[in-house]
Amino acid sequence: MPDLSLAELLDLDRRHVWHPYGPMPGRQEPLVVEAASGVRLRMADGTGELIDGMSSWWSAIHGYNHPVLNEAAREQLSRMSHVMFGGLTHEPAVRLAKRLVDISPEGLEHVFLADSGSVSVEVAVKMCLQYWRSLGRPGKQRLLTWRGGYHGDTWQPMSVCDPQGGMHELWQGVLQRQVFADAPPVAYEESYADQLRELIERHADELAAVIVEPVVQGAGGMRFHSPAYLRVLREACDAHDVLLVFDEIATGFGRTGALFAADHVGVTPDVMCLGKALTGGYLTLAATLCTARVADGISRGRCRCSRTGPPSWATRSPPRWRTPRSTCCSGRTGRPRSSGSRRGCARGSPPRPTCPECGTYGSSGPSVSFSSTAPRRGGHGGRDTGRRARGRVAAAVPRPRLHDAAVRHG
């Protein structure tokens, strides 16, 4: 197919391409990107570059066109791109699973590789439901979660997204009715902890699991909460025979200052969902980790994905957790350190990582202000580079190592 002019590309896009979170056809023309490098997107219309303030929906944690990830992709594709994972295995997937077990909270020993974050949550829910069915307790089939949460756009994940203020209000009355607790406060409050305990106890006979986004509810409004609530949930679930699921698809791999949000309080969930940053944004890959207890309980059933564990995904594990030292986009290395500052965070947060060499976007790095009257660019169906906006608060989740100079220039 010959190269398309910008006008031809936009015309075909308008006629045939259905973009996420927008109508068909879109109400506004999308911005056309012709190249990406580091944190910058080069526009095809010649107007220049934009800083990607959402790091491709939080997944491109090392930026675009990263030389280490590029080389890993080329090397693996030259040997093997994909084989089915049923009855077969290969070294990249085995190494990835072992690496995830090594770095995840202690006790998570088994890894199911899937093709998206939503599917990871689907798998987690199926694990929990099947676990209780295998123990002869099929009545434990509901989930408890926080209001204000987001867990994906496929069927079961939609049922545990916020039922009123979320993106799935259309499906009320069709999705399974779950149990919702009020969104957690930023600071620890014993009265709220008591509410959680009481709610879990009251519904224990019908609850298969509690599922939450630990430390920060991302797409629901960037709401931070005390990590101490994770310990409350762990203790209450143990006391009342309920499984605990942490959805770390957005928070995993350093987004909250620890490698995983669960690490802030040393809590191990029964099931943990990973995605987004798992491949540095190069390809879609997710993982559902579980304890031996859960795996033993459900091992008589089956679950599969056509794209489970392809080698070209598995070799693309980000260098951030391949080695104990992190790599900046400039090639410099530095061991991340924590900073207790909360500057620039409107809703509270735990300590966040800072690279001593190049600085990390966040509480102790450059802060970015958003005007409620500023024109918005990017995205489709609107022109908002950070579509997760609530009132006067715009959510920006850029690549963690966003240099001061990039922010000033952008």
Image (cartoon, rainbow, N blue to C red):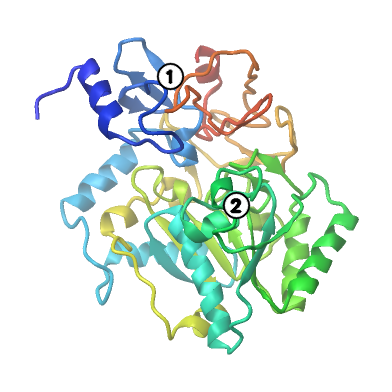
Task: Specify the farthest residue to the left.
Answer: 1
Among numbered discs 1 and 2, the one appearing first in the sequence: 1
Cα–Cα span, label 1 and label 2? 31 Å
**Residue reaching furthest to the right:** 191
Residue drawn at 35 percent across, 70 percent down: 304
User: Mark on residue 161?
Assistant: 2
Left or right: 249 in relation to 149: left
Quadrant (top left/top right/bottom left/bottom right) for the N terminus: top left
User: Residue 86 location in percent, x, y?
Assistant: 27, 73
Q: Name the quadrant containing residue 310.
A: bottom left
For label 1, the residue is 50
Residue 291 shows up from this direction:
no
Q: Is residue 192 visible?
A: yes
Q: Please report the residue visible at 39 percent of the width from the left and 52 percent of the height from the top.
A: 317
| Camera-side residue of 220 and 59 | 220
131 displayed left or right of 306? right
Quick one: label 1, few (<14), some, or many (20+) residues within 10 Å?
Answer: some
Q: Residue furthest bottom?
A: 136
Q: Position of residue 316 (x, y in %)?
A: 34, 50
